[in-house]
Image (spheres, helix red, strand yellow):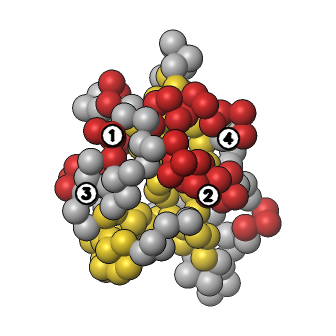
C-alpha cells in the first residue's frame, strides 16, 4: 500500500499551534534573552542529562540547536502572554515515517498545571496528520520526564546514547506513541 502522507517538503515542523489557553509560537533569535531568563533556574535542569543548561553559555548552545532545528517553539500563556517554556520537533525520518518531540522545558512556576500534556496533545494532533509515530528522548535519570511522558501514553521502546546538539552523548530512553 502506498504511503499517502505528505513528505517533509509539504508540511511545516514549525507552524503556529494553539488551543484555548496556550500558543506554540515559532522560536526566533530575538527570543533568546526572555527564554534564557526562564531557563536560568538550575531546578529546571536537576534531573536532565545536561544539568548545566541554566548557565548562559551552555544555554546558548541549546538555543542555537533550537534555531538550527527549524522546529522549535516558545510556549506562551494566551491570557497573560507569559513565556512558559520551549519545545521542538526534530529528527524527522521519512523512511520510518516518524519524528521526535523534545528538548522541552517549562519554568518551575508552570509545573504541575497540566501544561505539558496540553502542549504534547497540540503537537501530536498536528504532526499525526503527516507521520505515524512520534518518539521522545528522555534522559535515563530524568524520572520527572519519564513519569510525564508515560502519563500521555508513550511506551519505552529502547535505550541509547544520544548526542544533543553541541553536547557530549548522554544515556537516554526512547519512548514512542503511534498514531
Foreground: disc 1 or disc 2: 1
Residues at discs 3 and 1 in contact (Cβ within 8 Å): no
> Total label count?
4
Mark 3 and mark 1 lie on one chain; the one further toward the N terminus is 1
C-alpha distance separating marks 4 and 2 = 14 Å
Q: Secondary structure at mark 2?
A: helix
Mark 4 and mark 2 lie on one chain; the one further toward the N terminus is 4
Q: Secondary structure at mark 4?
A: strand
Q: Quadrant of residue 146?
A: bottom left
Foreground: disc 3 or disc 4: 3
Mark 3 and mark 4 lie on one chain; the one further toward the N terminus is 4
Residues at discs 4 and 1 in contact (Cβ within 8 Å): no
Q: Locate residue 118 relative to residue 153 in the image: left or right.
A: right
Q: Residue at x 58, y 55 (%)?
A: 61
Foreground: disc 3 or disc 1: 1
C-alpha distance separating marks 3 and 4 = 26 Å
- Label 4, residues with CA under 10 Å away: few <14, some 14-19, many ≥20: many
| Residue placed under numbered mark 1 in the picture | 42
What is the number of the mark on residue 65? 2
Mark 1 and mark 2 lie on one chain; the one further toward the N terminus is 1
Mark 3 and mark 2 lie on one chain; the one further toward the N terminus is 2
Q: Secondary structure at mark 3?
A: loop
| Residue placed under numbered mark 4 in the picture | 26
- Label 2, residues with CA under 10 Å away: few <14, some 14-19, many ≥20: some
Mark 4 and mark 1 lie on one chain; the one further toward the N terminus is 4
Viewer-proximal residue among 152 and 90: 90
- Label 1, residues with CA under 10 Å away: few <14, some 14-19, many ≥20: few
Q: Locate residue 179 relative to residue 111 in the image: left or right.
A: right
Q: Residue at x 67, y 70 (%)?
A: 5
Foreground: disc 4 or disc 1: 1
| Residue placed under numbered mark 3 in the picture | 142
- For residue 125, say whether it is visible: no
Amino acid at each position: 500500500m502506498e504511503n499517502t502522507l505528505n513528505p517533509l517538503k509539504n508540511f511545516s515542523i514549525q507552524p503556529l499551534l494553539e488551543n484555548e489557553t496556550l500558543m506554540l509560537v515559532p522560536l526566533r533569535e530575538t527570543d533568546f534573552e526572555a527564554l534564557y531568563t526562564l531557563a536560568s533556574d538550575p531546578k529546571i535542569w536537576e534531573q536532565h542529562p545536561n544539568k548545566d543548561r541554566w548557565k548562559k553559555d551552555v544555554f546558548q548552545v541549546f538555543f542555537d540547536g533550537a534555531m538550527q532545528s527549524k522546529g522549535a517553539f516558545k510556549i506562551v500563556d494566551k491570557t497573560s502572554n507569559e513565556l512558559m517554556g520551549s519545545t521542538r520537533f526534530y529528527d524527522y525520518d521519512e523512511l520510518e515515517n516518524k519524528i521526535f518531540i523534545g528538548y522541552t522545558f517549562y519554568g518551575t512556576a508552570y509545573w504541575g498545571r497540566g501544561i505539558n500534556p496540553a502542549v504534547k496533545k497540540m503537537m501530536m494532533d498536528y504532526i499525526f496528520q503527516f507521520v505515524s509515530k512520534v518518539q521522545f528522548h528522555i534522559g535515563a535519570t530524568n524520572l520527572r520526564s519519564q513519569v510525564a511522558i508515560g502519563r500521555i501514553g508513550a511506551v519505552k521502546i529502547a535505550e541509547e546514547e544520544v548526542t544533543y546538539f553541541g553536547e557530549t552523548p548522554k544515556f537516554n530512553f526512547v519512548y514512542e506513541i503511534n498514531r
